Image (cartoon, grey):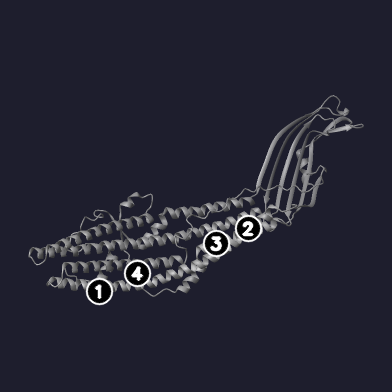
Amino acid sequence: MSIRHLSASAAILVALAAGPVAAQGQAPASPSPDAGRETLRLTLDEAVRRAVASNPDLAVVRLGTEVEAARVGESRSAFVPQLSSSIGRSSSATPPSTLLLGQRGVDVDDWFSSTGVRQRLPWGSGTWSVSYDTARSATNSPFSSFDPSLQSGFEISFSQPLLRDRAIDAARQQYLIARRNEQSADLRYRESEVQAIAAVKQAYWTLKATMANVDVQQRSLDLAQQLARDTRVRVDAGQNPPLDLVQAEAEVAQRRENLIRARATAEDAEDALRRLIADPADPGFWRLHLDPIETPTPSGVAPDIDAAVTKALGERYDLARAGHDLENAQTTVKFLDNQKLPDVRLETSYRGSGLAGTEFVRDGGFPGVITGTRNRGYGTALGQVFGNDYPSWSLGVTVSYPLGRSYEEAGRVRAEAEARQAQQRIASLRLKAAETVRRAGRQIRSAAERVDAARAGAGLAEQRLDTEQRRYDVGLSTTFLVTQAQRDLLEAQVNLLQTMLDYESSLVSFEAVQLAPPASDADRGPVTGQPVLPLPTAAPRGIFRTGSGSQ
């Protein structure tokens, strides 16, 4: 079989562009496993779109952003106003402890309720509270002026730290770190998306090359079968020894095995691409035959490596995430620095009180004789509360400070070490990013040069086989030499396929490493931030002299 009119490199490009086809006039060694299957003509953009939409590994990382967003909500809840309310009844009986009570004890029955709102402010770490309470008391005490009595009170309090917790407190530290972790989770998703797209493109071009290799192996088998038929004719005519036929048929068997291996490799490559782009909810997708129809990228101008390095150092997602880790460590250092300060707080409160009910009118000396009653409604108590009839207020400063080495001092040493560690990690990542981008750029240049060399080698191998075939046709060559020339052509064509795949892979890698590290060097899972601790809001109550009876 003469191939003088067919360029080997052109045949490879056609195979890569159009997929595997059987040589005209030659039957394949075995039926194609794709016969009768529905075919999906797949472009590179469509493969990427399917991967981004359906890849479960990406979905895992995408859900990580929702987890971190929920943590932000958890941390923000520390600043949400808290409503508290209580209602109850109590009863107490006190035995007579003084002569004034005679032989009878004192019974007190209370109905009471209280409602209040308190909040931690998201700035300055101050806390405020507003509450309103009311009670109805009935008693048989001879000293009581009201039975029953209606009491009400309105209180507003505010507490403001002046040193510790003023610039930053535990609630704001958690919120800042949770916000950065949410941003890091989003960056981790973008990084994973870049890596997933690169993996899909690599798998796409690998499938393209392995399918083209099936075509190359099929053509090589056809050449071996044609040579075996020609050799048989010559052996039957007594022109060649029988050993030539044995050698030719052995070569056919070897190339049939190569074809079987190539088909298995192509099926593995097809499944590898299918796994990256398949929708897990569509099991029928595994039965489709994928036909990559994208045209390979022609060798172009060498990339600007220095510009690519500058872009990578400014835009790489892993560097941005490392920057957030450093900021988190610095926030922790700032918080622990602040916690070493004395806890100095300004405390202030105001309370208005009111009293109403059934009042006893007494005459005579203490405790007097009840001569009548006077009813005062609940509105009287409300008027006293908000009319400033019975005000109580306080204003003061509290100070507390640990004596000795505090937990915060020890924690600050650890936090500073973690901050320095984060700085060194960023420096290491920047060096590694620059080295990775430069290496990827050089791989494009060397792969392009290898493609040119491999294409030339394939052309020369084709010329040699054409020459050897013509010599064999006129009896000047042997089966062994033609077989060797066929093997050399096959090796050159496979090498051309590999170099073209390497070129496409280098383009994909160079594009990806400017935004994200290679998947082998990256974190395997989503960002996992630290858990958010519940921080209840304290209710400020003002400051009063101990034993004064006010609170």
Q: What amino acid does circle 4 point to? A: Thr
Pointer 1 or 2: first along the chain: 2
Mark 1 → mark 4, Cα distance in angstroms: 23 Å
Q: Are marks 4 and 3 in contact (CB under 8 Å)?
A: no
Residue tagged 2: 415
- Mark 4–mark 2 distance (CA, rounded to whole Å): 50 Å
Q: Nearer the viewer, mark 3 or mark 1?
A: 1
Quick one: 156 or 188, which is closer to the camera? 188
Real-space Cα separation, disc 3 to disc 2, in angstroms? 16 Å
What residue did someone put label 1 on?
Answer: 460
Q: Secondary structure at mark 3?
A: helix
Sequence order check: which comes first, mark 4 or mark 2? 4
Q: Quadrant of residue 265?
A: bottom left
- Measuring from the top left, give residue 311's x and y in whole percent: 49, 70
Residue of label 4: 297
The crowding category of the residue bearing disc 4, from other C-alpha atoms within 10 Å (few below 14, some 14 to 19, many at least 20), is few
Q: CA distance from mark 4 to mark 3?
A: 35 Å
- Say if 381 sits above or below 468 in the image: above
The residue drawn where x is 58% and y is 61% is 421
Would you identify the image quadrant in which residue 84 lies?
Answer: top right
Per the image, the residue denoted by label 3 is 322
- The quarter of the image holding the C terminus is top right
Mark 4 vs mark 2: in front: 2
The amino acid pointed to by label 3 is Ala
Q: Compute the Cα span from label 3 to label 1.
A: 52 Å
Of residues 419 and 187, the one nearer the viewer is 419
The reply to whether callout 3 and callout 1 are in contact (CB within 8 Å) is: no
The residue drawn where x is 76% and y is 39% is 378
> Residue 202: percent from the left, percent from the top?
37, 62
Query: Which circle's residue, 1 or 4, is located before the other in the chain?
Result: 4
- Residue closer to the observer: 455 or 537: 455
